[in-house]
Image (cartoon, helix red, strand yellow):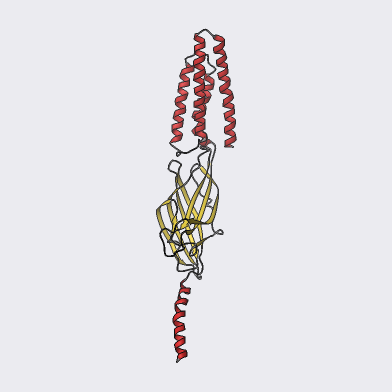
Amino acid sequence: MRSIFRLFLTLMFLLPVLAMGKGASSDPAVDVGIYINRINSLSYKEGTFNVDMTVWFRWKDIQIHPDKTFALKGAIINARRDEYSGAISGTDTQWAGVDLVATVHNAFNVRQFPFDSQKLLIQIEEIEQGTDVIQYRLDADNITLNKNLEISGWKVVGDQAVVAERKYETNFGYVGKADAQTFTSSQLNYEIQLERISPMSGLKLIIAPVVAILILLLTSLLPTTQSARFGVGTTVIFALVSSHYLVLTQIPETNYVTIAEQIVIFGLLQSLVYFIVTVYAFNAHNRGDNPLHQRLDKLLAAFLGVTDLVFAGYLLTVIL
């Protein structure tokens, strides 16, 4: 009788432990992949682009649902369609696919605008479970770049997918565990590298200020007494200011000067020198000091020509 009683007590203690062990996640690994169907509406000014893509997950533990607990970081999901979620036929492996259409915020580097290249970053992150429950693993064998992916004005030159851990220095108020002061989640980072299809797309934006700068050089060859020396110079300044406004409507505020802005600033500085020297030369001519005003005209033309060549060499170095 005592033996039976001891056996009963043993079972009373062991059964809950066995039940807890059976319910625990045995394999936190979740294979994750992504396929881009379409990208459009790149906006430097808004810092966004639109993407149509498919994300999939493959895992073993039936107690988790990574297709339900992920987020597209830094993005607004405009449409979502769950393709399928369940076991792969004839296996104990779970699979789920999700079609997404989203507006993604992206940090565009416009330092070399309009001759820039860009990187588009898409981040898929598990937001409910830590890495002890769900840990992404790159499905490298099945992630491929869409060969038919076309983005207006751009060519896709490559892609890169990396799985990483994202550690937050907070537990977001979840105090179930006294020692849980941080939260670490799993994240898929997918990057697409872009280049301009042709330099002509950039030249279209800078052709106006470049022509204005060259006209300024040609006008400096006219005699000081020609009224065009002042009239054309004023027109050049208006053209440069208009070009700068056009550039500012396409790019965000930055703490650096883009190539397009450098061209405009260069032209404005040349215009300032042009007017200062022209006024001095005109006054010298009115005083009857012809040698001085002729020398000033030659110096101005030489200054504009040399600085144009130096700046053109600098631009070629930066662009190429």
Residue 5: image quadrant is bottom left
Give the x, y percent position of residue 37. Answer: 48, 52
- In the visual, does 31 lie left or right of 83? right
Q: Is residue 257 above or below residue 89?
A: above
Q: How many marks?
A: 0
7 vs 45: above or below:
below
Q: Position of residue 299 (x, y in %)?
A: 57, 18
Point out the residue furthest to the top here: 288
Q: Position of residue 72 (x, y in %)?
A: 44, 54
Quadrant assignment for the C terminus: top right
Rendering coords of residue 108 (x, y %):
49, 43
Q: Is residue 77 above or below residue 180?
A: above
Task: State the residue in front, 74 or 181.
Answer: 181
Quadrant where the N terminus sits is bottom left
Q: Residue at x 44, y 29 (%)?
A: 242
Task: Give the residue furthest to the left.
Answer: 78
- Report whether residue 224 is seen: no
